[in-house]
Image: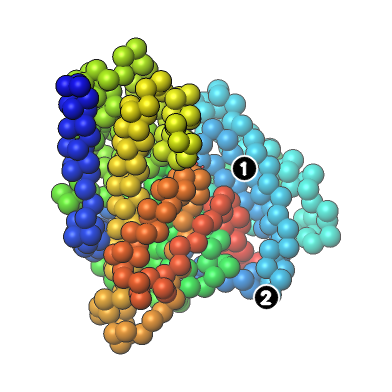
């Protein structure tokens, strides 16, 4: 009995530590908007890097022709072809092909990596091309989704700052990756140029905007998390004199690195951060994204196992970092059988303990979803779409304006409790009336097609 009491006490402490009252969420909203300002005022002015993407015109449905995209962001890359019919007819067709990257190329030379990609792309172009749309020798346009840290110089060029996700092609660091790819394409005999070099979050925004012109921001919550949105150029103080025909430009927030003292942080979060290879980095990401949620829950349960000894022999399973993946956690959290069969299968025989586990999953996921919601409302506040009628909106108070936010990523798309908590919190923070004008639109795998659309929007043909 005593050990059970201790476990319940620990649960309560954890729950209090994770509290996201509406007051707390409002503080996070404000902090997000303030940090956005600071990141736009000067480089290094905030943990939010607020990177310029040079994308100032998003596709709007009028694009026409055949465009390609290459999506490189992990151990696989994808090549795509999209056919656009112009006004009204939208996307006529698209083909995608996935390819694994051979292990040795991930740590070889830049030339070998890009040669391999260019050759694969050439095969794809030749196989798929029915020849009806484009003349064989006509220059083709490519959107290049490159999801590594890049210092962008124009919409179609950018310098690789560093590799992540297991890549270490050292001689590519400091080079313009779009030019590297173009050189390799020329060598492969492929008449193609990079019309747009973008982060995948920008591709997601582009695709959603293509279908719905009220789209102002995109958020991804999958293994990691990020957001981008359309900012007025005159609000970008660190880049004065930036002129675009639309008066706006897309800013890649790199919001995974957002931090505020208002975020409800527990000792488990601190331990997770300390033991991570990138401690003090990506603080927001470590509280809200799929890579970490399971491990936060595991840490809570493991400490309960140690201090309250309620798991018996099952405790050993909890001692291993990242053993408890977020999809597993979702499966237990959403187990609707009265005796929690799924939890039993995964973790333990004891029913009371099973109920406790579901509570822990709930607390972790609810906090994550509500903080992500506050982040989204923070963006809306910064651009005057949160109904508060600030000067930023440039409109008289009270004019309702439809606002669409694209959301992508496995956590939002596949973890229904997470999605429900997030949606609910957005309404709670904005209020029913304002929330009616805010649409959260799920986008699946949109970044590749989005990059092809950006190639169309920035085509020199
Ligand atoms: P990525 O972000 O790696 O490009 P996704 O957007 O598909 O890919 O997100 C994958 C992540 O989403 C996984 O790492 C996992 O944490 C989370 N995820 C996927 N499916 C589920 C699920 N059913 N329940 C909870 N989390 C999930």
Does label 1 or label 2 sit earlier along the sequence?
Answer: 1
Give the quarter of the figure containing the C terminus: bottom right
Q: Say whether mark 2 is within 8 Å of ligand 1.
A: no
Q: Residue at x 73, y 63 (%)?
A: 92
Residue 453 picture location, percent across and down: 60, 61
In this rendering, position of residue 143 left or right of residue 192: left
Residue 295 picture location, percent across and down: 34, 31
Instruction: Using the rendered view, name the quadrant where residue 265 is placed.
Output: top left
Give the quarter of the figure containing the N terminus: top left
Name above or below for residue 344 compared with residue 50. above
Q: Residue at x 16, y 21 (%)?
A: 2
Name above or below for residue 219 compared with residue 242. above
Identify the element where label 1 is drawn.
strand
Query: How many discs mark residues in the rendered view?
Result: 2
In this rendering, position of residue 278 left or right of residue 100: left
Name above or below for residue 101 compared with residue 50. above
Q: Residue at x 79, y 62 (%)?
A: 133
Instruction: Using the rendered view, name the quadrant where residue 105 is placed.
Output: top right
Q: Which residue is mark 2?
A: 87
Residue 253 visible? The answer is: no
**Foreground: 443 or 258?**
443
Q: Say whether mark 1 is within 8 Å of ligand 1.
A: no
- Real-space Cα separation, disc 1 to disc 2, in angstroms: 27 Å
Q: Which residue is mark 1?
A: 78
Residue 360 picture location, percent across and down: 31, 36
């Amino acid at each position: 009995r005593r050990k059970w009491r201790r476990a319940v006490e620990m649960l309560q402490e954890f729950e209090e530590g994770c509290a996201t009252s509406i007051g707390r969420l409002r503080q996070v909203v404000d902090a997000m908007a303030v940090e956005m300002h600071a990141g736009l005022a000067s480089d290094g002015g905030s943990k939010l890097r607020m990177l310029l993407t040079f994308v100032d015109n998003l596709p709007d449905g009028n694009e026409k022709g055949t465009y390609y995209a290459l999506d490189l962001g992990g151990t696989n890359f994808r090549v795509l072809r999209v056919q656009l019919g112009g006004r009204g007819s939208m996307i006529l067709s698209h083909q995608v092909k996935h390819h694994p990257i051979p292990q040795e190329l991930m740590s070889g030379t830049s030339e070998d990596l890009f040669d391999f990609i260019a050759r694969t792309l050439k095969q794809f172009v030749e196989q798929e091309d029915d020849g009806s749309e484009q003349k064989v020798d006509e220059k083709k346009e490519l959107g290049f989704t490159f999801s590594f840290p890049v210092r962008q110089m124009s919409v179609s060029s950018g310098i690789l700052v560093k590799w992540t996700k297991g890549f270490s092609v050292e001689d590519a660091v400091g080079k313009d990756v779009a030019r590297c790819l173009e050189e390799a394409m020329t060598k492969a005999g492929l008449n193609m140029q990079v019309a747009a070099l973008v982060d995948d979050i920008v591709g997601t925004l582009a695709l959603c905007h293509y279908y719905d012109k009220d789209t102002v921001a995109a958020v991804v919550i999958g293994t990691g998390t990020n957001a981008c949105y359309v900012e007025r150029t005159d609000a970008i103080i660190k880049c004065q004199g930036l002129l675009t025909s639309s008066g706006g430009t897309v800013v890649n927030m790199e919001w995974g690195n957002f931090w505020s003292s208002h975020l409800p942080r527990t000792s488990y979060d601190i331990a997770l951060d300390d033991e991570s290879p990138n401690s003090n980095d990506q603080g927001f990401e470590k509280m809200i994204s799929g890579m970490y949620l399971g491990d936060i829950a595991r840490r809570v349960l493991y400490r309960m196992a140690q201090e309250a000894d309620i798991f018996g022999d099952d405790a050993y399973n909890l001692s291993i970092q990242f053993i408890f993946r977020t999809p597993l956690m979702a499966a237990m959290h959403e187990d609707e059988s009265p005796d929690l069969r799924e939890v039993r299968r995964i973790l333990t025989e004891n029913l009371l303990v099973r109920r406790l586990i579901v509570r822990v999953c709930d607390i972790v996921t609810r906090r994550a979803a509500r903080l992500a919601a506050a982040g989204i409302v923070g963006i809306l506040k910064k651009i005057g779409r949160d109904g508060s009628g600030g000067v930023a909106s440039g409109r008289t108070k009270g004019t309702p304006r439809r606002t669409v936010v694209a959301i992508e990523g496995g956590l939002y798309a596949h973890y229904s409790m997470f999605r429900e908590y997030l949606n609910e919190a957005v309404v709670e923070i904005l209020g029913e009336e304002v929330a009616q004008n805010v649409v959260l639109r799920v986008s699946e795998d949109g970044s590749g097609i989005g990059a092809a659309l950006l190639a169309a929007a920035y085509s020199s043909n």
